[in-house]
Image: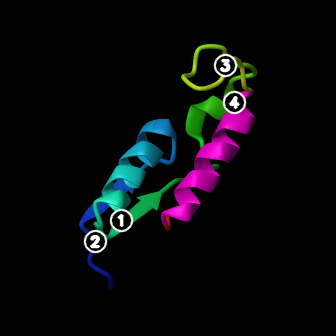
Amino acid sequence: MADFDVIIIGGGPAGLTAGLYAARANMNVVLFEAKDTGGEILNTELIEDYPGFESITGAELATKMAEHARKFGL
């Protein structure tokens, strides 16, 4: 069994953000998500108030977040 510095339960925006920061700090991180990465934003048709995007669908944002997280091994 592996030892982890950080164990994250939930792959929504908060869990992915926590995982990214921990990975950038060279911590050994594992993230568990029961369903699809992105959490509840997958159920959101259009997001119009997220920094960096005028508007984006929940599915698009979840995909971008998941791709970013994979670059850090999550």
Q: Which residues are magenta?
A: 57-72
Residue, disc 1: 29
Label 4 amino acid? Gly
Residue 31 in sight here: yes
Residue appearing at x 57%, y 39% in the figure: 39
Alpha-carbon span between mark 1 and mark 3: 29 Å
Distance from disc 3 to disc 2, alpha carbons, whole Å, reads 34 Å
Name the residue rendered at 71%, 19% in the picture: 55
Label 3 or label 2, whichever lies nearer to me, is 3
The image shows residue 37 at horizontal and vertical percentages of 60, 49
Q: Pointer 4: what residue?
A: 58
Q: Position of residue 4 (x, y in %)?
A: 28, 71
Say which label, 4 or 3, has the lower sequence index. 3
Q: Residues within 10 Å of mark 2 (few under 14, many from 20)?
A: few
- Return the residue at label 2: 4
Tell whether label 4 touches label 1 (CB within 8 Å).
Answer: no
Q: CA distance from mark 1 to mark 4?
A: 25 Å
Residue 50 x/y as whole percent: 57, 21
Residue underneath mark 3: 47
SS assignment at label 3: loop
Color theme of the render = rainbow
Q: Quadrant of residue 14?
A: top left
How far apart, in angstroms, are the residues tagged by discs 2 and 1?
Answer: 6 Å
The tag earlier along the polypeptide, 2 or 1, is: 2
Residue at 31%, 70% in the rendered image: 28
Q: Amino acid at mark 2?
A: Phe
Q: Is residue 37 visible?
A: no
Q: CA distance from mark 4 to mark 3?
A: 6 Å
